[in-house]
Image (tube, rainbow, N blue to C red):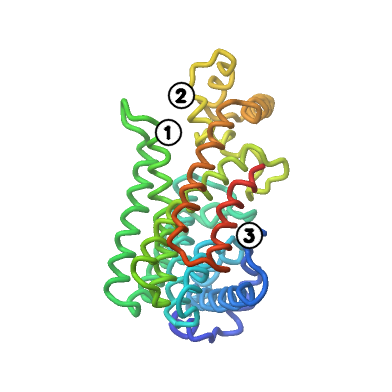
Amino acid sequence: MTGPRAAVDGIAPAEVWHRISTPASTVGAWLPDGPLGTSLTDGLGRVETALATAVASDHSFVSEAAGHLMAAGGKRFRPMLALLAAQLGDARAPDVVRAAVVCELTHLATLYHDDVMDEAAVRRGAPSANSRWTNSVAILTGDFLFARASDILADLGPEAVRIQARTFERLVTGQIRETVGARPGEDRVAHYLEVLADKTGSLVATSARFGASFAGVDPPLVEALTRFGELVGVAFQLSDDLLDIVSEDGASGKSPGTDLREGIATLPALIALAGDEPAEARLRELVARPLSDDAEHAEALALLRGSAALARATEVLRGYADRAQASLSEVPAGEVRDALSALCDYVVTRTS
């Protein structure tokens, strides 16, 4: 079987590389120029090569299914953060790329499972695996990617395995809590933010931790970068939530208002539902249910865009970005801290 080890040494079969025809996208103008930008670009190329081999199998259908979401693109946010954190140590250490690949494979695997749970028809502008094939194929493909991530992880040592296991526990806990919903009497906004910390923040935090630790960064700085990763990970998800509302052109990767149409209550809707302002009574009525009717969907989107709930959600986003920014006080001054600081600004300004 074609395994992941060759890829992290920079060797990927040509036929695998050609199947992955869409290069990884980055996440915006915050990325640095100059030697640091060149180093990150080189590192991402190595990650992409490793990913191409990691999703390959001797069985053509398995390769096609496992490479489906990777070929659809993606931000590669987690590998990028791992590579950037590694710049504070030995950025060329071979385990940095291996660890970045583990994080991205884990992320990709969760997307296959998420789409089954959400009954999603589209992911990254392409048919989701469950809609293209079946739920069973999508679930098993996610499991295949988890297995490949574990194979690479085994070479990174028992502490890395332990960190990944604890991260995976948080991912699953967050998904369970999201599926079950807030318990009676539980604050739905607080519940939602805790779910985001588990489902999104935990893996982004581990990406920063792995990048720094495998580059030989001192432990106190590794911990600071881990805290940063969790906070900026939640902030990035919140900004995606807001983009789903404020974007006129689907910049979030989805048609504007997709969450509203599907009855998914993200932070702005949850804040609206928790309010009692008479002026937002109609908004609360609309966002309390899925909106399959086009006229009601357009009305809800317009009301939400001008609502106090959206303004308060934006303040929550700024709060997470500010806390992430503050955690950088322990990072040495220089290009890396500047880039991480620019990322904090970017997650806020991309919604304006």
CB of mark 2 within 8 Å of CB of mark 1?
yes
Cβ atoms at labels 2 and 3 below 8 Å apart: no
The residue where tag 3 is placed is 30
Q: Residue at x 67, y 42 (%)?
A: 352
Residue 161 versus residue 4: which sits nearer the camera? 161
Circles 3 and 1: CB distance less than 8 Å? Answer: no
Query: Residue 231, image x and y in percent?
Result: 45, 51
Disc 1 on helix, strand or loop? Answer: helix
Determine whether, in the image, residue 94 is placed left or right of residue 296.
left
Q: What SS does tag 2 mark?
A: helix
Sequence-wise, the earlier of marks 2 and 1 is 1
Q: Secondary structure at mark 3?
A: loop
Decide: is 4 above or below 177: below
Picture quarter containing residue 33?
bottom right
Mark 2 vs mark 3: which is more N-terminal? 3
Figure quadrant of residue 46: bottom right
Q: Amino acid at mark 2?
A: Ala
x and y percentages locating residue 146 in the rendered image:
39, 66
Q: Which residue is mark 2?
A: 274
Q: Residue at position x 34%, y 65% from top?
A: 164
Asked whether 23 or 63 is in front, the reply is 23
